Each structure stands twice: as structure tokens, then as C-alpha cells.
């Protein structure tokens, strides 16, 4: 199988190129930034071209690994290059807009929305989460084949609609990133941040790890997610309201109300995750690794 990765010189494009090569697939990468593309070619040992047509023609699968803000511009260029039977899969972190865009412009072949819910720092595919978002019978048939392929290699795959995906990602990605960025803005305002990192306990180390992992990523990508995920502004507003409630309890030194609310949250969490108390032990194991 020959796979063309559009945006193959980016971090996730390189990750998938490396994975597919190790899995015995033929890979060609393409992109508009020639120096970056050539560097990726040397690093990966794959064929590379700035010509979209050269990359797509003759490939069985086209993998779209491009920023959401340039997604439509790229997809609009594909129809003259595609042949019946070719498969186009996008791996953006948002699904409603990309899937609708592919349906609008791509009439040949079968398209599928996919989201690898992990970053390019992942060592391999084992235990990584994937979401597939088919919208009709041909896409569902393709999604089932992709699911079999991924699960056979150790990944966890979930199928859902693009709408369900984006609603969940507003919390899974949007809120998580928001909390990390605001925490970073708070922590880095302290003059003794480095000293605190040196003497911090386990919980603090986990917080700093979250902050550093988010800040190490592409700011434009994270800004794009914040702007495009549906309902995120209201979710973050809810977080701000809850933050104020807890801050007011602390300000008024109401230990009894703090304890009551925290125990209520414990009870709620226990209903959905009876083993949640093992998280403290798991946190230590994670840091030790």
C-alpha cells in the first residue's frame, strides 16, 4: 500500500510516516515548505515532493495532516488529483468542519474523519486512543476496516458522529488546555517558580508537567482549537464560575463548606469510577517512570 501524507513534514505527519514505514507501507510526504519537507525526507528516508498531484496520484490512501485553518484550501486542490477508489482520511483534532469540507469537494473515492487523540510525543500506537467519525454506509465500512487495522496493533478505537466528537473534545482538549495555560500564567508570575519546582511534591510536579507539556506545543494549533471547538466559551465560563465559588469559600475560611463540597465530588466520582482512589498511587508510578 502506498500512502501520501499531506502535511507530512509536520510533527504528526512525521509520526504517521514513521509508523506506516515501520508497518511496511510505502510512504510519500508532501508540503509547501520545501526546506522543512527536505529535512523530513532526510530524517525519515521517504520520498518527498512539493507537488500535491505527484504525491496523490498513484497512492491508495491520502492522509490529511494539515492545520484546520488551511484545511479547506488544501482539500479544494484535491479533486483533479483523485481517482475512484482512493481513500482520504483527515486527522485534524476537530471533525465537523473537516468532514463537511471533504463531503463538499471530494466526490471520488471514500473519505473518513479520524482523530488520533495523542500527540507526536507518543512512543508507539499501543494503548493510544483513536476516534473515527463515519457519516454514511461506505464510510462506516471503511471505519470498521480501519478499526480492525488499529486494534490489531494495540490501539483503542471509538466510532461516533463528528458532532459527538467535537462536543466531547471541547472538554477533553479545550478545557484541559485552558486550565493548563491559565495555570502556567499563574505559576510563572511567581518569582520563585524555579525554586518551587525543585522542592515541589507529587501533585505540584504533575501540575508543572501538564503546564510544560502544553506550553511545549504549537501555540497556533492550540489557539485554533480554542477558536473552533463548539461551545468551548461556555464550558470555560462554567469553569470560571466554579473557580469563583471555591475561591470565595477559601476567602471566607469556610472549612466546613469546603469539606462538604469535596466529599460530594468524591461521591459523584466514585459512581462513575469506583477505583478512582488508585489515582494517587498511579500518579507516583507515572512520575517514577
Image (cartoon, rainbow, N blue to C red):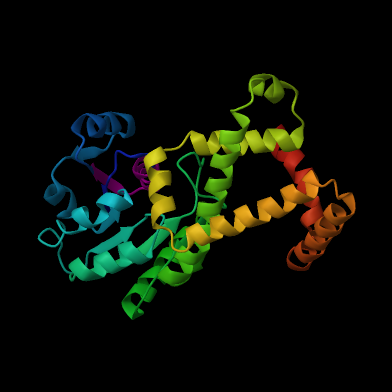
Taking depth in this image into account, of 186 and 147 the one nearest to the observer is 186
Question: Is 160 inside the magenta-drawn segment?
Answer: no
The reply, left or right, for residue 177 in relation to residue 225 is right
Kindly identify the residue that appears in the image at 18 percent across and 53 percent down. 56
Residue 26 painted magenta: yes
What is the magenta range? 12-29
> In percent of the image, x 51 and y 42: which residue is there?
122
Q: Is residue 81 left or right of residue 282?
A: left
- The answer to whether 2 is drawn above or below residue 142 in the figure is above
Name of the residue lying farthest toward the right: 256
- Give coordinates of residue 107: x percent, y percent: 18, 71
**Prevalent SS, magenta region:** helix
Image quarter of residue 242: bottom right
Residue at figure coordinates x 40%, y 53% from the top left: 227
| Residue, far bottom | 137
Q: Position of residue 135 (x, y in %)?
A: 36, 75
Amino acid at each position: 500500500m502506498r500512502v501520501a501524507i499531506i502535511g507530512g513534514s509536520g510533527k504528526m505527519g512525521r509520526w504517521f510516516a514513521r509508523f506506516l514505514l515501520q508497518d511496511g507501507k510505502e510512504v510519500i510526504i508532501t508540503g509547501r515548505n520545501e526546506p522543512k519537507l527536505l529535512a523530513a525526507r532526510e530524517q525519515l528516508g521517504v520520498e518527498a515532493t512539493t507537488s500535491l498531484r505527484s504525491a496523490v496520484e498513484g497512492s491508495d490512501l491520502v492522509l490529511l495532516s494539515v492545520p484546520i485553518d488551511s484545511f479547506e484550501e488544501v482539500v479544494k486542490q484535491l479533486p483533479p488529483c483523485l481517482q475512484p477508489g482512493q481513500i482520504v482520511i483527515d486527522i485534524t483534532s476537530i471533525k465537523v468542519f473537516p468532514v463537511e469540507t471533504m463531503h463538499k469537494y471530494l466526490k471520488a473515492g471514500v473519505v473518513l474523519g479520524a482523530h488520533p487523540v495523542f500527540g507526536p510525543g507518543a512512543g508507539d500506537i499501543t494503548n493510544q486512543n483513536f476516534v473515527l467519525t463515519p457519516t454514511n454506509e461506505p464510510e462506516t465500512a471503511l471505519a470498521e476496516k480501519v478499526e480492525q487495522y488499529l486494534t490489531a496493533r494495540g490501539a483503542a478505537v471509538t466510532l461516533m458522529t463528528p458532532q459527538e466528537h467535537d462536543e466531547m473534545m471541547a472538554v477533553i482538549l479545550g478545557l484541559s488546555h485552558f486550565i493548563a495555560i491559565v495555570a502556567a500564567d499563574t505559576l510563572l508570575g511567581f518569582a520563585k517558580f524555579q525554586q518551587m519546582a525543585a522542592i515541589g511534591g507529587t501533585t505540584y510536579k504533575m501540575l508543572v508537567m501538564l503546564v510544560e507539556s502544553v506550553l511545549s506545543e504549537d501555540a497556533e494549533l492550540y489557539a485554533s482549537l480554542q477558536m473552533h471547538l463548539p461551545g468551548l466559551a461556555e464550558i470555560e465560563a462554567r469553569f470560571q464560575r466554579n473557580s469563583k465559588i471555591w475561591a470565595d469559600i477559601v476567602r471566607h475560611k469556610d472549612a466546613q463548606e469546603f469539606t462538604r463540597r469535596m466529599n460530594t465530588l468524591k461521591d459523584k466520582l466514585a459512581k462513575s469510577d469506583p477505583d478512582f482512589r488508585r489515582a494517587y498511587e498511579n500518579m507516583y508510578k507515572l512520575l517514577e517512570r
